[in-house]
Amino acid sequence: MQELINKITELQKNKYTLLQASEKPKIGWVSIYTPEEIIHAAGIHPFRITGEKSLESTNATTLLHRNICSYVLSCLEEGIEGKYDFMEKNIVVVDSCNSRRRLYDVWNHYLKPDFSFSFFLPRFQNEFYRDFFRSQTLQFMEAIKGHFHCDISEEALLKSIEVFNGTRKKMQKLYNLRKENKVVISGSDMQSITQSGMTGFKEEFNSRMENLLSRVNEENGEHISQKHRVLICGSYFDHLNLIEVIEKTGAMVVCEDISNGIKYYDGEIEVEGSPVEAISDYYFNKITSACLFNTDKRVNYLLKVIKEYNIQSVVYFSLKFCDSNLMDYPYIKKQLNESNIPVLSIELERHLTNLQSIKTRIQSFFETKIP
Amino acid sequence: MIVLNQEELQRDIQYQNMINAITASKHESNDRMSSLRTSKMVSIINSYNFTSAYKNKSKVAFVGEQFPIELILALKVIPFNLETMAALLSRSDNLKTYFTLGDENNLSRDVCSVLRGEFGLGLSNCLPTPDVMVSCNHPCDGYMKIIFNLQKLYNKRVCSMDVPAVANDVTISYVEAQFRNMAKDIGSELNIKLEESDLMEVVNNSNQAKEYYYKTLDMFENSYLPDVSHELMMIAMVNLWGSKEIIKVCKTLYEEALEIREKQKEKKMRKRVIWFGQMSFFSDQIIEYIEKEVEIIYFGPFVNYRDRINPENPYRSLAKRFITYSWNPFTMSETIHQFSTKFKISGIILQNAWGCRDILGVNNMLRDAAKENKLKILMLDNDFLDKEKVAFDHVKNRIDAFMEILQ
């Protein structure tokens, strides 16, 4: 099975080489509210900018202050270092928080991308706000058509929806197996699989996922784990080494309620009328993110997931200076306490400058939870 | 997180708590007191409004900084600006107690100290129980989240206001529609009908006041007017637009500015710098030190320059004003370009407030704007509320160096 997992995670590990080899134009994105299907339907390759290749943010802090969220700084650092020169630094930024808003300003002003677009994510939910989001989605589509001189047909949109829904369904199948404790995939492998699905090679990803799911079904719950079950939530998080630290204590990460976890793959697009509206509404209805006003929706979803996955502990990783997650924490902590769910809160930097102290805190926390 | 019971949520108790919070100071302030009559008027009006908000019969709405309060006033509701309350708290010896309360309730120390102060005041039951709360991502998402957390204490209706950062026809229409919805929502929640005549009254008040306000601002083109820019900034911050009193405040300041101009006419103009962002609320030490050498002109009053509310469509005017006040490096750069020559500006001072992502996110683009306009720039890392995060002697060295290159 590991071989099949490796085949999937190669997409993530070789992301830059593969992206450069692809002849399609490309657009990077930084928020899971980006309607990728529209980019895909235009024949353009959408992928998440992750900042993972920047080892520090020295250059970025000359353009943005060091007290800005370090995910944003690391993405900017990659841009400055020329990691995205091969695709003319094209970017779409959904204005979902104050730091991303500034990322767009600075990226656009200093890096001079060939194509850039920013649209605003309403922080509240009702039909009025949904309509505004729809209007911006249409503007985004028109901007792509105008810039790349391409058509985006209804047929192409429906095809892209099918491909992206396919990815969602496959990931949800894998998640369901984790819920039922029928599959043992380490937290770090799972994280790599999740990120592979964000590289934009959807068709390839879907095919490799199909192979993995077939194998998992063949094994049919052969490897039942009795480990302490952990859920990760909070800011953007891709620190495989921290997942390993958790798992070395004898616990197992079985769910990632984060933007590069189940939140990205949640639900599916249901087309009844206009496909553009269906796409827009799918993203607008992602209501469990920290950037929105109503934390109750986030908490209710979190509690539902905790129940479904039979979670025993939660680790809340918040990036330093990620205000949305930092300010949600008081209420989330209170609600988890009331549900008797132990939670460990860790503020961390993108570049893990405080790794040793974080390790100690994780180890101490799980020593008290695992006999 | 702390839960307040109904017996505690009484405004007379909250008033006493607030008074205890903001008056706990063993030290006499060494800060300058403005000698302007306007300053005293503003203090009296603020005190009156503050006290009124704690009376049981008053209708109170929590609002954020620069929220266009005309609409709230037209509904006969008292707008209660949480940022102003945090600013008051900054001079208290007990500030740390309120921060600690936030820490103990799991709020990070890395968020803006104004938000930490607001959260601490809420948890310690110092704020008047509101009748309605306006949650808004302007000036920042942090403020929106504070309202969510406070709503859990008071369980009151929240009205939403969603503000994009860029002003254009589409976004202005979007915010305009929300103002219309908000007027209806607050009206139905508090059983108040918004009368057209009341709305026109606040519009007229606001516009009349702005006439004096901008006439005063324009006097800086050719005059040295100590203290006046500071007062213009204070008027913008306390945000009394639409009230009857604001007309008298702005008229008085204009008259005082005329008197000052007359007195100062023989004096040589001083070098001028423009100050971006707000000042530290706990002390005027930095401002006073800089003003020994140069004249400070505050940026705030230049935003929405010559802004007036169109009586034909006040909602749209308010929407435009609100969006334009967002921290937007491009419009700020344009403003620098527009006013630096006219007002003979030599340099820019930007206060980087710890935890304020809006300010921190624009500083390099402002540095470039300064360069393009041949202006010197000084960036000060500082805090709005927490004096423990600031060492004046460290800042002083940088100010001295800036002054040398200015001269």
Image: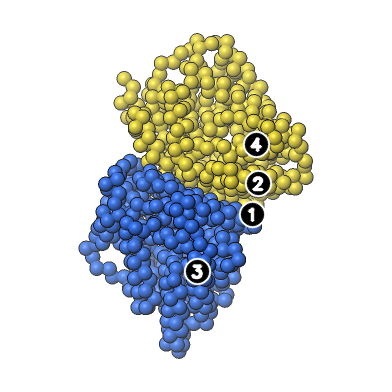
Instruction: Provide the letter of the chain coloured blue.
Output: B
User: x%, y% of residue B99?
Assistant: 31, 50
Q: Residues within 10 Å of mark 2 (few under 14, many from 20)?
A: some
Q: Amino acid at mark 1?
A: Val
User: Do the CB atoms of the residues marked 2 and 1 lie less than 8 Å apart?
Assistant: yes
Mark 4 and mark 3: Cα distance apart in space: 45 Å
Mark 2 and mark 4: Cα distance apart in space: 12 Å
Where disc 1 sits, the SS reads helix
Q: Residue at x 52, y 78 (%)?
A: B215
Q: Which residue was labeled with disc 4? A: A279
User: x%, y% of residue A131?
Assistant: 62, 45
Mark 2 and mark 1: Cα distance apart in space: 9 Å
Mark 1 and mark 4: Cα distance apart in space: 21 Å
Instruction: Provide the letter of the chain coloured yellow.
Output: A
User: Do the CB atoms of the residues marked 2 and 4 lie less than 8 Å apart?
Assistant: no
Q: Which residue was labeled with disc 2? A: A135
- Discs 4 and 3 carry the same chain letter: no
- Discs 2 and 3 carry the same chain letter: no
Front in this rendered view, residue B75 or B267: B75
Q: Amino acid at mark 4?
A: Ile
Front in this rendered view, residue B18 or A4: B18
Q: Residues within 10 Å of mark 4 (few under 14, many from 20)?
A: many
Label 3 resides on the chain identified as: B
Q: Which residue was labeled with disc 3? A: B201
User: x%, y% of residue A233?
Assistant: 45, 33
Label 2 resides on the chain identified as: A
Mark 2 and mark 3: Cα distance apart in space: 35 Å
Q: Residue at x 48, y 20 (%)?
A: A179
